Image (cartoon, rainbow, N blue to C red):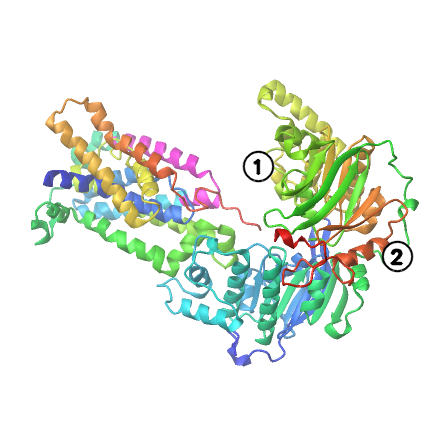
């Protein structure tokens, strides 16, 4: 059981981080399909820099930097240049997959796998006391980025719903024309929201590397960025909701691993497809009641 | 007493502060929306800005709000010229505008909406809700700061916007047509609130085209027509209502001109009835009520609809186009109840040129797609052959209707307003119409275009179509119509045939529309006033 919980957290943390990033963008009115590509790019950068600098922290910092740059640039294209948000996001994801695969070949060709391996070191940060509680102790014996993810849930909730900043952000995502009439700079707000979104997606990508296999692999995000979009919908664009949804998806991944390991007589392909099947079912169920921010995905068109 | 933000040295409010404009000019393309406007507003006073559609009221307000910037002329506060380049500038100068359509964010709560303006980026101010409630109390109404704006009525939203402006120490609160979206009871409440604001030393300006509203609720009144000020009155010196109507709709020199002088009668007894409306009462959603409306429109005639705007024109258009099916009364198209005509057939038979072209074109589609929109169907899929056909047809219509576009492949959204209207007219007039409903089709058009629209309308009628033509220009109505029906408070105040229709006779009926004449029909204000025997109170 402890194993399943540990595996659930491992699977849920990147989904949660990416989903929180997605929430920031979508609440401001931008549909950030590029979460997937941002995760993947950040994962590569995290591994590469961590390997080169021989410290994990440098890798994470570099990933955050690239996430910010990617978020702001994609935001610029989607918001300022009014590129179609879905098309730009998907095109970016395809580009990111191609570029990271190519970079993987080049870097491993030159320096071998070592060039993309995070140097060894303790990746667990046990919280004394809490980690010893049976079962749920597994939540407190994780990589420190997992605690960052836990903490971000209430922080983002507070920022979105209890501060002026969050209120402004939501105003831009609900009614751009009205937000502008009250004197807000909708364009700037949305681009900055995309920047923040990129940073969180990058943390998710970095976690894939440093929190788990400590190595970069081709397409290692494996569609998690897309699942994060489903997590957002299921969590109704709210941080705590997304925490629950991410936990559900994490658990479905962990259980499918467990089932595979026990060798139950189900074809392994079906088992591997579990998280995606759960996604489809969850969205189908939640779809009716889901009510996205009114301006989500709409290009910014203000009179004058 | 409130203190003006950023200029607290000026001391308490209400010490003769004024907001004025001098020689304000604003063009939109070739249309002069504001043509040298001079007007001055003072604090502590309710000032009505009166004028017909397109008189330039909204443009003036949008300039003061910082939404538009004037081509020339200046804005002065207490005699000092100020620059207003954007909405925040306006607010800094103490000018708050309540636009016709609410700018509140629907899915944020009332207090969150107010905090967008009041608060910083940090934690929300917990005292704001309380301050908002007490502001509302001071202004004489209640509000729940925690409810979501989307759950509020339009009247509540308006009050929230007013409270927000007052809380922000606005010195001048300007309301753009605040009553058009309100139910009659809410209108009374609004004017009570405006008077309250004035007593708090706020300068209140409201835009209206309802004469009575202006007369009853303002201390000062400015009448605009065609972008200029044509009259300016204090409460004590307001001229006769008839005079005001003439100022608003203009063409004083036309008095006495009759239909007989324009053309021979173009309909005769042999033409058959196209549309019959019998006893229609009630109101569409967000509309004003019609009361026992009877109207018959014959094939091949142009029936002009006169009346001060907001007396049932929109509702009549909705009725005729089938957008609204009334609960009381009937409407028949050549003997068939309109509601029994399938919508596919209706689209082919009923032409609609709405008064706002924004609702009538698909701006992201090309000119040829828009022109052919109503003829496209699944069996006319976008094969190269069909596309060629549609583009060819569109090219002809572009020529025929003089649409100024680089090519038929240009996006309609990139055309000017007048050309977009031409696209709509081209589309509607290419159908085999039984009836065309043209709502203010020449609004905002320059003289040449307006002449063309009138000519096309006549030609269409001569080909046997029944045309319902609404306009705020009496001269234009007399010129284009065979008969003119005057709408007043949701009723037909009279139908004038050839020879009877003059600016005077129409004006007299329109005066009834403003409710000035004691002999007018029952009031639509449901304030328990004595209604006539034919009162519509049965349907509440």
Residue B71, given in percent of the width and then of the height, sits at 67, 58
Task: Tell me how far mark 1 sits from mark 2, CA to CA.
Answer: 44 Å
Q: Which residues are magenta?
A: A75-104
State the SS at label 2.
helix
Count neighbours of disc 1 (C-alpha within 10 A) and say few if under 14, some if 14 to 19, many if 20 or more. Answer: few
Q: State left or right for residue A136 relative to residue B42.
A: left
**Residue in view at x 35 percent, y 31 percent:** A94
Q: State which mark lies toward you, 1 or 2.
A: 2
Relative height, residue B380 to residue B181 (above, below): above
**Is-magenta flag for residue A81?**
yes
**Marks 1 & 2 on one chain:** yes
The rendered magenta stretch, by its main secondary structure, is classed as: helix
Q: Nearer the viewer, residue A112 or B293?
A: B293
Q: State left or right for residue A125 relative to residue A30.
A: left
Residue B406, given in percent of the width and then of the height, sits at 67, 35
Residue ID for mark 2: B253
């Amino acid at each position: 059981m402890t194993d399943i919980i540990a595996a659930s957290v491992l699977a849920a943390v990147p989904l949660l981080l990416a989903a929180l990033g997605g929430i920031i963008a979508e609440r401001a009115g931008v549909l950030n399909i590029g979460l997937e590509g941002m995760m993947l790019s950040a994962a590569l950068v995290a591994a590469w820099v961590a390997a080169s600098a021989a410290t994990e922290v440098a890798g994470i910092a570099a990933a955050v930097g690239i996430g910010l740059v990617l978020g702001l640039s994609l935001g610029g294209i989607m918001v300022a240049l009014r590129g179609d948000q879905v098309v730009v996001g998907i095109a970016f994801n395809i580009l990111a997959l191609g570029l990271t695969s190519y970079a993987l070949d080049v870097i491993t060709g030159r320096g071998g796998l070592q060039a993309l391996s995070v140097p060894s070191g303790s990746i667990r940060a046990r919280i004394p006391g809490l980690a010893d509680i049976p079962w749920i102790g597994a939540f407190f014996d994780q990589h420190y980025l997992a605690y960052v993810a836990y903490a971000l849930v209430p922080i983002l909730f507070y920022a979105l719903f209890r501060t002026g900043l969050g209120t402004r952000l939501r105003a831009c995502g609900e009614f751009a024309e009205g937000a502008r009439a009250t004197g807000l700079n909708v364009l700037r707000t949305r681009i900055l929201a995309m920047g923040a979104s990129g940073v969180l997606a990058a943390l998710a990508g970095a976690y894939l590397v440093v929190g788990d296999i400590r190595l970069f692999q081709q397409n290692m995000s494996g569609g998690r960025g897309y699942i994060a979009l489903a997590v957002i919908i299921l969590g109704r664009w709210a941080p705590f909701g997304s925490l629950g949804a991410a936990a559900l998806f994490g658990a479905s991944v962990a259980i499918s691993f467990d089932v595979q390991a026990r060798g139950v007589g189900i074809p392994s392909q079906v088992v591997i497809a579990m998280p995606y099947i759960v996604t489809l079912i969850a969205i189908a169920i939640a779809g009716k009641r889901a009510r996205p921010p009114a301006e989500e995905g709409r290009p910014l068109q203000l009179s004058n | 007493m409130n203190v003006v933000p950023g200029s607290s040295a000026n001391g308490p409010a209400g010490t003769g502060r004024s907001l004025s404009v001098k020689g304000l000019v604003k063009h939109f393309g070739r249309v002069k929306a504001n043509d040298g406007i001079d007007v001055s507003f003072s604090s502590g006073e309710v000032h009505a800005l009166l004028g017909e559609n397109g008189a330039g009221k909204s443009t003036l307000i949008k300039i003061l709000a910082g939404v538009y910037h004037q081509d020339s002329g200046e804005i002065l506060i207490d005699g000092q010229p100020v620059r207003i380049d954007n909405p925040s500038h306006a607010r800094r100068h103490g000018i708050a505008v309540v636009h016709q359509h609410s700018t509140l964010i629907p899915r944020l709560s009332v207090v969150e909406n107010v905090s967008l303006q009041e608060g910083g980026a940090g934690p929300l101010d917990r005292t704001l809700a309380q301050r908002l409630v007490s502001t509302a109390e001071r202004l004489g109404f209640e509000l729940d700061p925690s409810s979501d704006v989307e759950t509020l009525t339009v009247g509540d939203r308006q009050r929230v916007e007013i409270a927000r402006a007052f809380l922000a120490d606005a010195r001048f609160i300007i309301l753009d047509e605040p009553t058009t979206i309100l139910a009659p009871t809410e209108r009374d409440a609004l004017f009570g609130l405006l008077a309250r604001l004035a007593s708090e030393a706020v300068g209140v300006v409201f835009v209206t085209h309802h004469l009575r509203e202006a007369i009853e609720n303002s201390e000062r009144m400015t009448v605009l027509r065609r972008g200029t000020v044509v009259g300016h009155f204090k409460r004590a010196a307001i001229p006769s209502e008839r005079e005001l109507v003439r100022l608003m709709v203009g063409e004083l020199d036309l008095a006495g001109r009759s239909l007989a002088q324009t053309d021979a009668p173009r309909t005769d007894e042999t033409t058959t009835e196209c549309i019959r409306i019998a006893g229609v009462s009630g109101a569409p959603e967000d509309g004003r009520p019609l009361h026992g409306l009877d109207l018959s429109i014959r094939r091949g005639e142009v029936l002009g609809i006169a009346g001060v705007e907001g007396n049932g024109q929109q509702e009549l258009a909705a009725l005729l186009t089938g957008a609204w099916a009334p609960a009381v009364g009937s409407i028949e198209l050549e003997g068939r109840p309109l509601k029994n005509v399938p919508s596919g057939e209706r689209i082919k038979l009923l032409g609609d040129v709405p008064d706002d072209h924004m609702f009538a074109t698909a701006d992201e589609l090309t000119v040829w797609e828009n022109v052919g929109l109503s003829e496209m169907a699944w069996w006319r899929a976008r094969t190269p052959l069909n596309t060629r056909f549609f583009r060819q047809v569109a090219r002809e219509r572009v020529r025929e209707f003089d649409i100024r576009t680089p090519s038929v492949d240009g996006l309609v959204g990139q055309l000017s307003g007048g050309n977009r209207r031409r696209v709509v007219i081209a589309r509607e007039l290419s159908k085999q119409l039984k009836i065309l409903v043209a709502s203010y089709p020449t609004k905002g058009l320059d003289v040449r275009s307006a002449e063309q629209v009138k000519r096309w309308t006549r030609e269409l009628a001569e080909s046997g179509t029944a045309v319902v033509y609404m306009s705020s220009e009496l001269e234009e109505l007399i010129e284009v119509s065979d008969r003119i029906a005057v709408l007043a408070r949701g009723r037909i105040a009279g139908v004038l045939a050839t020879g009877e229709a003059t600016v005077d006779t129409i004006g007299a009926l329109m005066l009834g529309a403003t409710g000035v004449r004691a002999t007018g029909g029952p009031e639509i204000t449901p304030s328990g006033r004595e209604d006539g025997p034919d009162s519509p109170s049965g349907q509440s």
